[in-house]
């Protein structure tokens, strides 16, 4: 009953991981899926990725986006396509939140000057951060409604999930990422993001996602970035050597990070 990523998406991800693959071969494979082609073209012309000229060919889009960004977009498209909306679950709102966390994770890597991390890997980790919750809503909606009721009554989410499900949604998310053959660093980021510094092997991508989730809540509440550095996530921000002054210079742009991601939801 596990959702699967479309075969073409898996083949594209393998092709993008091949150091000898060229843009023409990737574009040719991409064009086998009209919907995915349209999404990639739309993203290539978005304000986030677009340049000064209109991109009208898949080859040009592949060159413009680059391998890292294209891999991210293909993976995101595949992950979104793998799920159907569970009864009573707002799937579009879920993906909007996930894309916002993903965009903030990428923003933190770029604006926070985390030079040893890959911004697109951070994006994918953010996109996948709550995938376990979605999977459990899809496969066991009744028990997940019990979890949501317990959380609404004040129970910590992890404790409620452990009590009702016998495991946490981040554990399930990590297992699904492994089932889909995502890299170990991404699987570990999904599992460890609630407490990234407590992991056996500290995972900086997990830390970035942890901070990105707090940033998302600040944006929703229209709160200043300085709240991050007095929140429970402050030790993680310090561990990642994120500087308030550096991030604050670009905080205004953070609100627009998820805007162009609607292309992957349409």
Image (cartoon, rainbow, N blue to C red):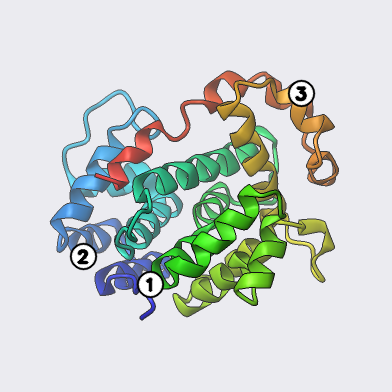
Q: Secondary structure at mark 1?
A: helix
Q: Nearer the viewer, residue 56 or 259?
A: 259
Residue 99's place in the image compared with 26, above or below, is above
Q: Residue at x 52, y 49 (%)?
A: 123
Q: Nearer the viewer, mark 2 or mark 3?
A: 3
Residue 226 bears which disc, if any? 3
Marks 2 and 3, Cα distance to the nearest angstrom? Answer: 46 Å
Q: Position of residue 50 (x, y in %)?
A: 33, 31
Residue 232's place in the image compared with 133, above or below, is above
Residue 21's place in the image compared with 166, above or below, is above
Q: Residue at x 57, y 38 (%)?
A: 104
Q: Is residue 131 left or right of residue 59?
A: right
Q: Quadrant of residue 130?
A: bottom right
Q: Residues within 10 Å of mark 3 (few under 14, many from 20)?
A: few
Q: Position of residue 153 (x, y in %)?
A: 66, 49
Residue 29 bears which disc, if any? 2
Q: Quadrant of residue 48?
A: top left
Q: Residues within 10 Å of mark 2 (few under 14, many from 20)?
A: some
Q: Secondary structure at mark 3?
A: helix
Residue 14 bears which disc, if any? 1
Q: Position of residue 235 (x, y in %)?
A: 85, 43
């Amino acid at each position: 009953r596990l959702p699967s990523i479309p075969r073409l998406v898996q083949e594209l991800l393998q092709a993008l991981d091949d150091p000898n693959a060229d843009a023409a071969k990737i574009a040719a494979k991409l064009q086998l899926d009209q919907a995915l082609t349209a999404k990639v073209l739309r993203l290539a012309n978005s304000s986030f990725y677009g340049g000064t000229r209109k991109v009208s060919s898949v080859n040009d889009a592949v060159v413009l986006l680059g391998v890292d960004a294209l891999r991210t977009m293909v993976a995101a498209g595949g992950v979104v396509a793998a799920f159907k909306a569970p009864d009573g679950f707002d799937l579009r709102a879920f993906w909007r939140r996930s894309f916002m966390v993903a965009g903030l994770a990428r923003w933190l890597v770029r604006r926070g000057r985390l030079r040893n991390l890959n911004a697109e890997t951070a994006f994918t980790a953010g996109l996948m951060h709550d995938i376990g919750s979605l999977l459990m809503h899809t496969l066991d909606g009744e028990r997940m409604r019990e979890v949501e009721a317990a959380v609404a009554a004040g129970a910590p989410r992890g404790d409620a999930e452990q009590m009702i499900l016998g495991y946490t949604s981040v554990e399930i998310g990590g297992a699904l990422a492994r089932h889909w053959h995502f890299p170990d660093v991404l699987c570990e980021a999904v599992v460890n993001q609630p407490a990234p510094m407590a992991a056996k092997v500290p995972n900086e991508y997990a830390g970035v996602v942890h901070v990105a989730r707090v940033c998302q809540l600040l944006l929703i509440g229209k709160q200043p970035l300085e709240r991050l550095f007095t929140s429970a996530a402050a030790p993680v921000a310090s561990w990642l050597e994120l500087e308030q002054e550096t991030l604050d210079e670009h905080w205004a742009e953070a609100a627009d990070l998820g805007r162009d991601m609607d292309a992957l939801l349409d």
